[in-house]
């Protein structure tokens, strides 16, 4: 039964996300309805350094966290006493950045007398899909971000099993490194994506499949192949075909991601394929995966770009699952930059 925000039947979670370079706070109702989602990005600050500087990120979180919390509550029209719990990203992420969010969440939980829910960052990305569609189990998730490339099987709600992961660079990291080699600023992924779609032809680049039955990924060799093409062109006194290289790189990445994701869905009899993480905003990947899933008869769920990049609404969605199964987290929890997704699975399993 649909209820109004703040009634006893509703679960209202204030969620905080500070794992990297976005300070984000959201209010989420019943794990899927976003009442507010405020994001303060640091991209312009870190662009000058060519990547995220952890110490700078932590300081900026400290500067804005209180204001973002107040703005999220105001935008949702919610008072602290109406909240069910306070959730926060416990890990993984940059330890200094995580600490800012964890300390803020603990302080609010104590001050307001609310339970605390420590939440896994990647679980948040996965459950961002529940903000746009009802999830069915078992399902398969392709996680693609700056720090993670994984295939995650969920047999039941809140149960995570990683069946494949990157052995070196994450896909988002590879995009940024290739973009830098092609002369683009941080973050480089959107530049490579745009050029790849504009290029007339692709510069041929290798596909890294690893063992025939492996669901793991590897992108460091592909990155090196791009550098070789660029350097060989310069040694010959030629201008590198930047657009063609971007297209060749993206086609190589996308083909491997799509093929392994579809194979994983079939092998695990998954009812849905979910896409999540910052690279899920990549137009080339979204288009290719949509086309392939349509041809294969696989139900595909992809959040809108605003819920692909780091945000707090996804943390509220994942925290709701944890709350329903396990309740709150002890107040002595600590920020964990190496937090295990599989160990965060709900206790019922």
Image (tube, grey):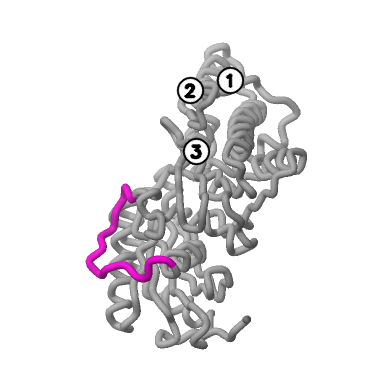
Q: Check if mark 2's residue and mark 1's residue have beta carbons within 8 Å.
A: yes
Which mark sits nearer the N-terminus, 3 or 2?
Answer: 3
Viewer can see residue 226: no
Q: Is residue 268 above or below residue 122?
A: above
Residue under the point 29% across and 61% down? 99
- Sequence-earlier tag: 3 or 1: 3
- Give me the C-alpha separation between circle 3 and circle 2: 15 Å
Q: Which residues are magenta?
A: 325-339
> Residue 176 got which mark?
3
Under tag 3, what secondary structure? helix
Magenta stretch secondary structure, dominant: loop
Distance between the alpha carbons at the discs numbered 3 and 1: 18 Å
The answer to whether residue 304 of the structure is visible from this angle is yes
Left or right, 18 with respect to 263, comes to left
Residue corresponding to mark 2: 221
State the residue position of label 1. 206
């Amino acid at each position: 039964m649909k209820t109004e925000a703040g009634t006893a039947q509703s679960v209202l979670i204030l969620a905080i996300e500070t794992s990297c370079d976005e300070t984000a706070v959201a209010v989420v109702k019943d794990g899927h309805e976003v009442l507010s989602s405020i994001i303060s990005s640091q991209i312009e600050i870190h662009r000058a350094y060519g990547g995220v500087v952890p110490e700078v990120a932590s300081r900026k979180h400290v500067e804005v966290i209180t204001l973002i919390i107040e703005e999220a509550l105001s935008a949702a029209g919610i008072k602290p006493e109406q909240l069910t719990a306070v959730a926060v990203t416990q890990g993984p992420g940059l330890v200094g950045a995580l600490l800012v969010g964890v300390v803020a969440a603990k302080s609010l939980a104590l001050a307001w007398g609310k339970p605390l829910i420590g939440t896994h960052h990647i679980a948040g990305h996965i459950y961002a899909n529940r903000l746009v569609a009802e999830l069915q189990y078992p399902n398969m998730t392709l996680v693609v971000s700056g720090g993670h490339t994984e295939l995650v099987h969920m047999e039941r709600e809140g149960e995570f099993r990683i069946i494949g992961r990157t052995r070196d660079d994450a896909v988002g990291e590879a995009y940024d490194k290739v973009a830098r080699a092609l002369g683009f600023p941080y973050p480089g992924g959107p530049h490579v994506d745009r050029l790849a779609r504009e290029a007339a032809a692709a510069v041929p680049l290798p596909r890294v499949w690893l063992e025939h039955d492996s669901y793991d990924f590897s992108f460091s060799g592909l990155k090196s192949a791009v550098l070789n093409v660029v350097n060989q062109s310069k040694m010959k006194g030629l201008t590198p075909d930047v657009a063609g290289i971007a297209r060749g790189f993206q086609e190589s990445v996308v083909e491997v991601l799509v093929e392994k994701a579809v194979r994983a869905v079939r092998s695990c009899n998954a009812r849905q394929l979910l896409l999540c993480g910052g690279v899920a905003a990549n137009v080339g990947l979204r288009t290719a995966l949509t086309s392939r899933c349509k041809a294969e008869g696989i139900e595909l769920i992809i959040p809108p770009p605003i819920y692909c990049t780091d945000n707090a609404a996804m943390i509220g969605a994942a925290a709701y699952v944890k709350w329903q199964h396990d309740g709150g987290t002890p107040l002595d929890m600590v920020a964990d930059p190496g937090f295990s997704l599989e160990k965060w699975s709900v206790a019922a399993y």
